[in-house]
Amino acid sequence: MKTANRIPVLMYHRVGDAHNDWERKYCISPQGFAAQMHALEAKGWQAISLDDFVAWLDARHEVPERSFLLTFDDGFLGVYEHAAPVLQAIDWPATVFLVSNLIGQHDSWCERHNPSGATYPLMDAGHIRELQDRGFRFESHTRGHADLPTLDDDALHAELAGARADLTRLLGRPVNFLAYPFGRYDERVATAAQTAGYVAAFSTQPGFNRREVSRHGLRRLDVFGTDSPA
């Protein structure tokens, strides 16, 4: 087996129907998502679990070349409805980063970004527990999807440590990984994430991850709804 010396992390958001150009950036159609997964599979790529990815980073585990980590930010209901069946059919794991105060609600932070003001449903606790039982991994996307560098120290701690506590209660296991909302962080935010107990955190800085990458500045490739399978 030829082993990987760098691993990409793919980042998706909503899987469903898009209704304007802004939505088409952050939303991929169910058919488009399935086509991308099948294209990756046909090219010999293989999704790995979050635990295997972290063990690889720490040089405790080797994975084959063309391994990648699949992630979804926000916890949209479309992940349950559209992405999960595709992934289960090819036996691929995925990690979803949840906004703990908005579980079962809508992506309210998008009201001011989406030109139409439309929001979309997020998974509820039942969806999350069902997918966890089916092998999905859930981690933290903070409590309220705040722009973390703009917060004072107390509010920053509440977003980070509060989400860990909320999700640990929901999932029945420790929550040790974070995805920064909007990909926004700085040195103070990264330090606060470590202090709150996060082992590692994912940014939106593009690129592949090598073992020397900062554990609180992991890189991801943002997949847009307009991206073709190729």
Image (cartoon, rainbow, N blue to C red):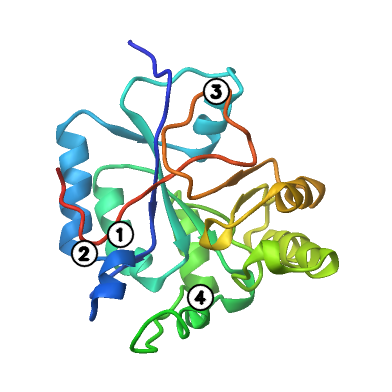
Looking at the picture, tell me which residue is in the foreground, 41 or 7. Answer: 7
Q: Nearer the viewer, mark 4 or mark 2?
A: 2
Q: Secondary structure at mark 4?
A: loop
Asked if marks 2 and 3 touch (Cβ < 8 Å), the reply is: no
- The residue where tag 2 is placed is 30
Q: Are marks 1 and 2 in contact (CB under 8 Å)?
A: yes
Out of 156 and 100, give the one closest to the viewer: 156
What numbered label is drawn on residue 83? 1
Kindly identify the residue that appears in the image at 77 percent across and 46 percent down: 191
Which of discs 2 and 3 lies nearer the camera? The answer is 3
Q: Secondary structure at mark 1?
A: helix
x and y percent of residue 165 in the render? 75, 62
Label 1: few (<14), some (14–19) or many (≥20) C-alpha neighbours in 10 Å: many
Task: Describe the element under mark 2 as helix, strand or loop.
Answer: helix
Identify residue for label 4.
Answer: 124
In the image, what residue type sits under mark 4? Asp
Image quarter of the N terminus: top left
Q: Residue at horizontal 21%, vertical 28%?
A: 44
Q: Is residue 10 left or right of residue 153?
A: left
Marked residue nearer the N-terminal end (1 or 2)? 2
Image side of residue 42 versus residue 82, left or right: left
- Please tell me which of labels 4 and 3 falls first in the chain: 4
Between marks 1 and 3 in the image, the one whose residue lies nearer the viewer: 3
Residue 211 — which label? 3
